[in-house]
Image (cartoon, rainbow, N blue to C red):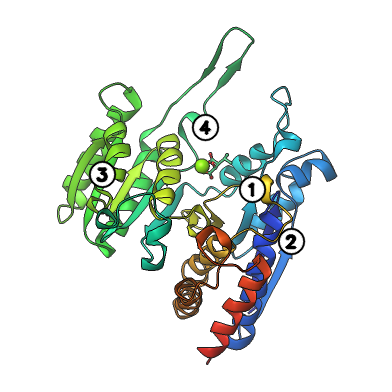
């Protein structure tokens, strides 16, 4: 069977990190006898320039019919006019909605070789291995908006089904990890948070009594992430809190450049993308760290096509490059994006078979 991956390079450093990852995936597939076809499609600013639409129908259709989607990044100053009604980010939001990828998994594990790149003291980093499960297709991102020059509003609304499905997924994942689930909300202020809290508490009580469960207000969670990040195992939270907290977890780990993410649907292909953005300031210079995209591809290999062994080989190859400083400058090396791709391929060849 041919495995069809859709690659969406997007904007800024997106094309560079996606190219590097496609190269590595091609080596891995060739070596493992995996029949892999990779089709590139337009999204974001690149799609606006070419078609006027940040998510052309052809792109969404290809994604829905694929065995998985690998995305670089979207957005940049060229399309940043606040008065613009068509924006690159709309492409990403519509893609998430169109693929119904309601759960966004953002794991952070401390790579010992990256401890220096973290702003935190080394003793706080010991044992950091956490997973944020962010609700991705509801809440304030998708509520009704009004926008005037004197007044604007964004509606935050959730219904029970949207909360329950992501909480169950987070509960299942907590069970496969250290068995600790934390709901992050703002239940002292927001009605939506109180709904999250009552539904989550009931689900955990009925279906996941084996888990250690706690709740934390989002402000306290933001603080705990820098004072005691090792406290967390699985955090589950609404769309916007998850957006904010995962930039923070990425910084805690030392580099936004190495963290992957997986966005999962109930059934159907997932969307895999690095946590970092399009970094227009360094685009086109070969400085972008492709490892977050490569590790996102590893998540794809294990989740969408059940090739955990290949995912493990890819992760090992990336880890070895990090440990031997064969990296881009953001995490202490001196290689370009494409040189990192070659280094990872060499590592893969050494562990081949
Ligand atoms: C992310 C990004 C997006 C989001 C933007 C680009 C719309 O920040 O994936 O975290 O806010 O979800
Ligand atoms: Mg974000």
Would you name the residue on which mark 3 appears? 227
Compare marks 4 and 2 and give the one earlier in the sequence. Answer: 2
Cα distance, mark 4 to mark 1? 20 Å
Q: Which of 337 and 241 is in front in this view?
A: 337
Q: Do the residues labelled 2 and 1 touch (CB within 8 Å)?
A: no
Compare marks 4 and 3 and give the one earlier in the sequence. Answer: 4
SS at badge 3: helix
**Disc 4, ligand 1: is the CB inside 8 Å?**
yes
83 relative to 95, above or below? above
Q: Which of marks 2 and 1 is in front?
A: 1
Which of the 4 image quadrants contains residue 83?
A: top right
Cα distance, mark 1 to mark 3? 29 Å
User: Is the N terminus in the top left, top right, bottom left or bottom right quadrant?
Assistant: bottom right
203 relative to 31, above or below? above
- Neighbour class for label 2 at 10 Å: few (<14), some, many (≥20)? some
Q: Nearer the viewer, mark 2 or mark 3?
A: 3
Cα distance, mark 4 to mark 3? 29 Å
- Neighbour class for label 4 at 10 Å: few (<14), some, many (≥20)? some
Q: Do the residues labelled 4 and 2 touch (CB within 8 Å)?
A: no
- Neighbour class for label 3 at 10 Å: few (<14), some, many (≥20)? some
Q: Do the residues labelled 1 and 3 touch (CB within 8 Å)?
A: no
Residue displayed at 45% across by 32% down:
139
SS at badge 2: strand
Would you name the residue on which mark 1 appears? 278
Across and down, in percent, residue 303 comes to 47, 66
Would you name the residue on which mark 4 appears? 141
Across and down, in percent, residue 99 comes to 58, 50
SS at badge 1: loop
Cα distance, mark 4 to mark 2? 27 Å
């Amino acid at each position: 069977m041919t495995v069809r991956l859709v690659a969406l390079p997007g904007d800024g450093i997106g094309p560079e990190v996606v190219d590097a990852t496609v190269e590595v995936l091609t080596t891995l597939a060739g070596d493992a006898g995996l029949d892999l076809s990779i089709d590139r499609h337009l999204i974001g600013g690149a799609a606006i320039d070419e078609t006027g639409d940040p998510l052309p129908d052809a792109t969404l259709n290809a994604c829905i019919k694929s065995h998985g989607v690998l995305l670089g990044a979207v957005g940049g100053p060229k399309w940043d006019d606040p008065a613009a009604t068509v924006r690159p980010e709309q492409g990403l939001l519509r893609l998430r909605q169109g693929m119904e990828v309601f759960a966004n998994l953002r794991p952070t594990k401390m790579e010992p070789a990256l401890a220096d790149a973290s702003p935190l003291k080394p003793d706080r980093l010991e044992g950091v291995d956490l997973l944020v499960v962010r609700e991705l297709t509801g809440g304030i991102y998708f509520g009704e908006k009004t926008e005037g020059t004197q007044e604007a509003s964004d509606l935050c609304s959730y219904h029970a089904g949207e909360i329950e499905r992501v909480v169950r997924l987070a509960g299942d994942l907590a069970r496969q990890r250290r068995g600790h689930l934390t709901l992050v909300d703002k239940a002292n202020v927001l009605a939506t948070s109180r709904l999250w809290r009552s539904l989550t508490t009931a689900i955990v009580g009925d279906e996941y009594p084996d888990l250690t469960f706690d709740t934390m207000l989002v402000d306290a969670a933001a603080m705990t992430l820098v004072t005691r990040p090792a406290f967390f195992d699985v955090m589950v939270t609404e769309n916007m809190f998850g957006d904010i907290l995962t930039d923070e977890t990425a910084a805690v780990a030392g580099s936004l450049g190495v963290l992957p993410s997986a966005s999962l649907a109930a059934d159907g292909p997932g969307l895999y993308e690095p946590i970092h953005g399009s970094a227009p300031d360094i685009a086109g210079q070969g400085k972008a760290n492709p490892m977050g995209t490569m590790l996102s591809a590893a998540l794809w290999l294990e989740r969408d096509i059940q090739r955990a062994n290949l995912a493990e080989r890819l992760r090992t190859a990336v880890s070895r490059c990090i440990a031997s400083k064969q990296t881009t400058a953001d995490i202490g090396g001196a290689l370009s994006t494409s040189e990192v791709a070659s280094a990872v391929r060499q590592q893969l060849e050494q562990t081949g078979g």
